[in-house]
Structure formats: C-alpha cells, structure tokens
C-alpha cells in the first residue's frame, strides 16, 4: 500500500506543477507577453466624420519607426505610439493594448467638427467640439457653420479655450448647433477686427449685426421675435440689416 501512496502523491505534485505552469503562461500572455500577429484598428466614429479611415490610422501606427508584427506586445512602446496618434489633430484619443489572440488592438476616437474657418489667402481649418483647431481633409467635407473674417488669432492659438474671445465664440457655435432652427438658419459668422460678429442667414436676406458673442441667448431671442413678429407684417425683403447689440431693442434698417 505504501508504494501506491507514493505514486499518487507524485501524480498530485506533477498536476499542481502543471497547473501552476499553465497559470503563469496565461498570466504572461494576458499581460501582453504574446507575439503580435496582426494590428486591428477600431475606429470610434459615432458621428460619421471620415477625416481618417482605418488605413490612415494603420499607416500612422506602422510609421512609428518601431517594429510591431512579430514582436512581443510587452516590448512594443504602446504609450509612444498612442502619443504619436494623438499628435494628429483629427484624433481625440487613442488606446493600444494586446488581446489573447496576439492582436494589437488600436482604438481611436475622432474629433467632431462643429465649424469651418474659411480664408481667402490661407488654407481652411475646422473647429472641433472641444475647441481644438484641426486641418481640413481631402477625403471628407463636413457641412457646418462657416467662420470668416479676423480668424488669424484663432488659427495661431490652435485651441479656442486658450483665450476668452475663443471661449465666447465656441459658446456661440455650440448654442447655434444645439438649436435645430438656428443650426439650419445660420450659414456664416463673420468676425470683425474689433471682435464683433455679423451673421449671414441661410434663408432671410438681412445681415444680422450680432455684436460681440456676449448675452448670446438674449440676442437670439430678440432675433426670433424679429423673424416671427416683424418680418411677417413688414415684409421679408424690406430690411437689409438688423442690429442686436443694444439691450432691450432691435434696430432694423
């Protein structure tokens, strides 16, 4: 009976060692110790903005200068590649990680444009939802409100949140985009050197002198009164401009 007990004990020990070896191997694999077999691009593009596609992102990843396929995922400089991806202004966020199949997963979230800066003597640009100024794309054009005039400072800042004027303009654009009527009606915002804004409407012919982007909600309420109560009774083509700058009144000429 004693030899049987010894054999059983040795089998148990062998099974325990085998189980430990499996757990260690599984743990190493889960931590990214597996070799990268393929690169899988996951493009988070809920807003259907096609400034970049999967091929563009893959080119950015593979163009990092570091070998990827055939290399252990734990040896790939994932944070450096993430940083390079986020250097592209069209990309809001990027995350890289390895899965259990040996794939390098590249998850990318694109920025959403809310306005387009137009210039006669320089390239256009887009203003993203978070205020970042990003370049246009040859692949895709977004139908958003146009921004013209004194826009040099906006382009130089590269982010509207870096100045009070930029923050106010961003607030005005957001207000327009959140309202179905104003989003359809406001075609273009023209910025003067003194910071005052004129609105070019989509339907009615009047130039709207909005003034500086302050008291935004109140001014748009006055403009709505002008559209609903004054134009229907006085005629849609009678006035060439309407001024909203002064508190408590609307000036139409």
Image (spheres, rainbow, N blue to C red):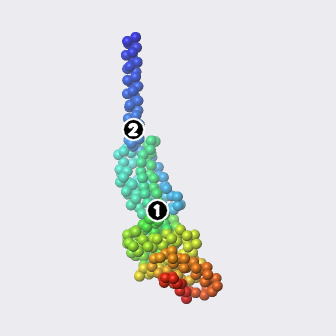
Neighbourhood count class around disc 2 (C-alpha, 10 Å): few under 14, some 14–19, many 20 upward: few
Residue 14 in picture, x, y percent from top left: 38, 24
Q: Residue at x 47, y 60 (%)?
A: 110
Residue 161 in picture, x, y percent from top left: 40, 68
Residue 176 in picture, x, y percent from top left: 52, 71
Residue furthest out toward the front: 248
Q: Are marks 2 and 1 in contact (CB under 8 Å)?
A: no
Q: Residue at x 38, y 54 (%)?
A: 81
Q: In the rendered image, which residue does mark 2 sit on?
A: 27
User: Residue 13, relative to residue 161: is it above or below?
Assistant: above
Q: Residue at x 46, y 42 (%)?
A: 101
Neighbourhood count class around disc 1 (C-alpha, 10 Å): few under 14, some 14–19, many 20 upward: many
The earlier-in-sequence mark between 2 and 1 is 2
Residue furthest out toward the bottom: 253
Residue 117 in picture, x, y percent from top left: 46, 73
Q: Is residue 49 visible?
A: yes
Q: In the rendered image, which residue does mark 1 sit on?
A: 111
């Amino acid at each position: 009976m004693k030899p049987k007990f010894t054999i059983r004990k040795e089998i148990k020990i062998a099974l325990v060692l085998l189980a430990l070896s499996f757990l260690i191997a599984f743990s190493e694999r889960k931590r990214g110790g597996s070799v990268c077999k393929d690169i899988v691009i996951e493009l988070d593009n809920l807003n259907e903005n096609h400034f970049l596609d999967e091929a563009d992102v893959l080119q950015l990843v593979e163009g990092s200068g570091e070998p990827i396929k055939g290399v252990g995922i734990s040896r790939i400089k994932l944070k450096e590649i993430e940083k390079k991806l986020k250097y592209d202004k069209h990309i809001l966020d990027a995350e890289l990680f390895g899965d259990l199949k040996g794939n390098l997963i590249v998850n990318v979230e694109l920025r959403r444009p809310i306005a387009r800066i137009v210039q006669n003597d320089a390239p256009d640009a887009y203003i993203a939802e978070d205020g970042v100024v990003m370049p246009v794309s040859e692949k895709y054009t977004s139908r958003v409100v146009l921004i013209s005039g004194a826009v040099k400072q906006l382009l130089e800042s590269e982010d509207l949140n870096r100045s009070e004027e930029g923050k106010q303009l961003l607030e005005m654009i957001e207000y327009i985009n959140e309202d179905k009527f104003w989003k359809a009606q406001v075609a273009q915002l023209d910025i003067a050197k003194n910071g005052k804004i004129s609105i070019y409407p989509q339907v009615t012919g009047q130039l709207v002198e909005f003034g500086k982007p302050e008291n935004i909600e109140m001014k748009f309420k006055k403009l709505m009164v002008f559209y609903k109560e004054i134009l229907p009774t006085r005629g849609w083509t009678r006035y060439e401009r309407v001024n909203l700058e002064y508190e408590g009144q609307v000036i139409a000429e």
